[in-house]
Image (cartoon, rainbow, N blue to C red):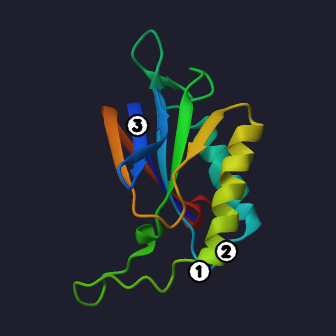
Amino acid sequence: MKAVIQRVDTCSVEVEGECISSISKGLLILLGVSENDSGDDVTLLARKCSGLRIFSDDAGKMNHSVKDINGEILVVSQFTLFGDVKRGLRPYFGDAAKPEKATVFYERFIEILSNEGLTVKGGSFGAHMHVTLLNDGPVTIILDTEALK
């Protein structure tokens, strides 16, 4: 699994011109699931995201997690994180999980974060979405469970 995590002041998702989710201060997580991912990957990545210390303390040092600041999380599915452009210029998405698997893992990821007491919202799996965000910093972290093992 891969995640692109952005620290945001606000973030929202629109589908067909209608806002379906929005958060205030917290994290936007763009989440990609691969065919090789397991349930252990979901748990590992969710726990890493919730504990990631990328919010500033009183001294201005990144020392707080989204839990510490009572922030919110918006999770958006994004199979394009597994786009491979080693050959040519058109991405190959063969390593991305099929929707049946990816949907289950996406929902489980949100469930794990919610069970940690966090306010978690989602996009619309498989829909064409417009994501608007006010990046705070900007701070962007990329996680890949293959590199975390």
The dot on residue 11 is 3
Give percent across and percent down for residue 29: 49, 48
Q: Could you say where residue 64 lies in the image, as x and y percent from the top left?
A: 54, 24
Q: Which mark is residue 101?
A: 2
Residue situated in front as seen by the camera: 90 or 99: 99
User: If you read the primary sequence from the N terminus, does the residue marked by circle 3 or circle 2 appear first?
Assistant: 3
Numbered mark located on residue 98 in the image: 1
- Disc 3 residue type? Cys
Residue 91 vs 51, above or below: the answer is below
Say whether marks 1 and 2 touch (CB < 8 Å): yes
Q: Are marks 3 and 1 in contact (CB under 8 Å)?
A: no
Q: Callout 3: helix, strand or loop?
A: strand
Density class for disc 2 (Cα within 10 Å; few <14, some 14-19, many ≥20) is some
* Quadrant in which the C terminus appears: bottom right
Of helix, strand and loop, which one carries label 2? helix
Q: Quadrant of the N terminus?
A: bottom right
Quadrant in the picture for residue 56: top left
| Quarter of image, res 90 | bottom left
How far apart are the two marked residues, 3 and 1, measured between alpha carbons?
27 Å
Question: Which residue is painted at 56% across and 29% down in the image?
Answer: 66
Which residue is depicted at the point 57% across and 74% down? 34
At label 2, the amino acid type is Lys
